[in-house]
Amino acid sequence: MLRLYNTLSKKIEQFIPLNPPRVGMYSCGPTVYDYTHIGHLRKYTGDDLLRRILEANNYEVKLVMNITDVGHLVSDEDSGEDKMEKGARETGRTVWEVAKFYEDYFWKSVDGVNIKRPNIVAKATDHIEEQIKLIHKLEKNGFIYQTDQAIYFDISKFPDYTKLSGQKLEEKETGVREDVVVDKQKKNPYDFALWFFTVGHFTGHTMRWSSPWGEGFPGWHIECSAMSMEYLGDCLDIHTGGIDHIPVHHTNEIAQSEAATGKPFVKYWVHHNFLIVDGEKMSKSKKNFYRIDEILQKGFDPLALRYLFLTAHYRDRLNFTWESLQAAQNALNNLRETIRDWSAVILGSEERATPESLDSTDSGLTSFARMTENYYQKFMDAVNNDLNTPQALAVLWDMVKSENPSAAKSKSILEMDKILGLKLDEYLGRPIEVPKEVQKLINKREQARKSGNFEESDKLRHEIKKLGFEVKDTPSGTKVNG
Ligand code: AMP
Ligand code: ZN
C-alpha cells in the first residue's frame, strides 16, 4: 500500500484515489522561455518515479502536464516584464519561435533521463477558451473584480486562502518586495491576476486574445486550474510541483479552483525539493545551472543523472557535484555489467548453479525464487513508503551482491528497473564494447591458448586486465567482462 506525504495535511497518508484503479495526476510543466536545466529534471524525474510506482501498484494513471507558452511575469507577483517577451527580445526571435525552441529542448532533456511522456500535454495557448470559461465562473460566484489593468481574484472572499503553505497572510505580506510594481487599484497585495489587459505596461504584448472583459492574456495560475480540471475533472487525485510553488502558484490554484467548483480541488499535494549547486538553488536567474548538454559534453550518460536523483529522497535537497555524478555513473556501469553478466540466465539459455538447483528439486528452486521475491517485496515496501528511493537502491544492491544469481533474481532486477527507469534491459545480451587494442590482445591470447602456450596466454590475460577487461574461459568459449 502506497503512502505519500501530503503538503496539505503535512502528514504521510495512505494513498487512496478518488476512483480506483484510476488516478488523475497533474504536474506543473515548464515555462518555455529559457533552457531546461538539471534542477528541473530532478523535479520531472520525481514525478516520473511517482507515476511508475503508481503503475507498479496497478493503478491506471492519467498524467496531464501543462506547457506555459503564454509567458508569465518575471516575478510571481503580477508585475515585472513578461518572460517570453523578454526571451524573444534578447534572442531576436518571435515569442512563438522562442516557445517552440525551448519546448523542443525540454523534451530532449526529459527524454535523456528516460522520463515517460505524460498522457496529455496541454499548452496554455491552446486552452484560452477554457481559461476564460473558468474566470467567467468565478465572476458568477462573486470572486473577481476589475481594475484598469487586470481582472483579479479577491482572496478576501476565499476562506483559508493559505491552507496549503500554512503561512499567515501577515507573514506573506512582510515578504512583499520593494521592486514590485503594484497596481494601485488592487484591493489586497495578494489578490492575483486572472486576466491582464493589453494596456499600459502590456500595450505591446504580442500574445493577446479577446475576452468578455477586454483584449489581453491570461495570468499564469489560471492555466493550471483550467487545464487540469478540463482533463481530470473538478477533483484531482495528485498535483505535483516544486516546493517553490507552494506559497503562491499552488495556493492560488486551490483558491480559484475551489471558488469555481465548491469542491476540494486536489486530494494529495506532492512537492519536490530542489537540486542545489554548492549550497544554492539552481536557477535560471542565478546562471548557476547545468543542462543536459553539459552532462553529455563531459562524457556522462544522462541516465547517470537519473541514478544520482534516485540516491536522494525527493523531499530532501540534493547537492549536485561532478564527483557525485561520477559516482552515480560508476554505480550505473556496475549494474549494467551485472545485467550483461546475467544475460544468458535471464534469457533462459543458461542455467546457473544455485545451492537449491544443485539439489535438483523443484522445491529448492521455488524457495530460491521466493528469496528473490523477498527482495522485490522489500524494494516495493521502500518505494511505497513515500518514495524512499535511497532505501530501494540499497535493497537492489543487497540483491546484486548476494551470492548465486539465478534467473528469478535477475528478473527481479528488471522488475525493479521498471520503476527506477535506468534502461537496464538494454544491456540484456548486449555484447560488450571492446576497444580495438583490447580485441587484438584477446585474439592473440586465443591463438596462444590454441597452440598450448599457456604462459603467453596468462601474460596476455594480465595485460588485458590492466586495460580494465577480464577474460574468462568457459565451456561455451572465451567471454569478456568490462
Ligand atoms: P520553471 O520552468 O522555472 O517554472 O520550473 C518548472 C519546475 O521545476 C517547477 O516545479 C520548479 O519548482 C522546478 N524547479 C525549478 N528549479 C529547480 C531546482 N533547482 N531543483 C528542483 N526543481 C526545480
Ligand atoms: Zn502549475
Image (cartoon, rainbow, N blue to C red):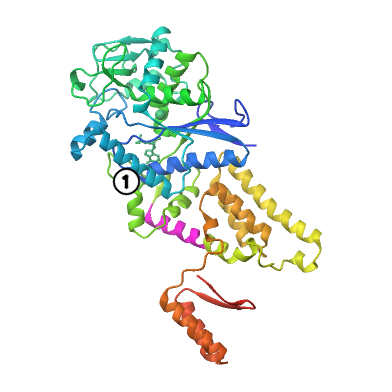
The residue positioned 56% from the left and 64% from the top of the image is: 429
Magenta range is: 321-334
Q: Position of residue 468 (x, y in %)?
A: 47, 73
Q: How many marks?
A: 1
Q: Is mark 1 within 8 Å of ligand 1?
A: yes
Residue 358 falls inside the magenta stretch:
no
Q: Position of residue 49 (x, y in %)?
A: 52, 42
Q: Is residue 135 visible?
A: yes
Q: Dot 1, how many residues are within 10 Å of its Cα: few (below 14), some (14-19), or many (20+)?
A: many
Magenta span: helix, strand or loop, mainly?
helix
**Quadrant holding the N terminus:** top right
Residue highlighted by disc 1:
289
Quadrant in which ligand 2 is drawn: top left
Q: Is residue 415 left or right of residue 93?
A: right
Q: Quadrant location of residue 218? A: top left
Classify 388 as above or below 205.
below
The residue positioned 28% from the left and 20% from the top of the image is: 209
Classify 109 as above or below 95.
below
Is 468 or 342 nearer to us in this picture?
342
Q: Is residue 12 visible?
A: no
Q: Is residue 422 left or right of residue 37?
A: right
Q: Position of residue 194 (x, y in %)?
A: 34, 18
Q: Position of residue 86 (x, y in %)?
A: 22, 33
Classify 326 as above or below 55.
below
Q: Is residue 343 left or right of residue 444?
A: right
The residue positioned 27% from the left and 44% from the top of the image is: 287
Residue at disc 1, secondary structure: loop
Q: Which amino acid does the dot numbered 1 rest on?
A: Phe
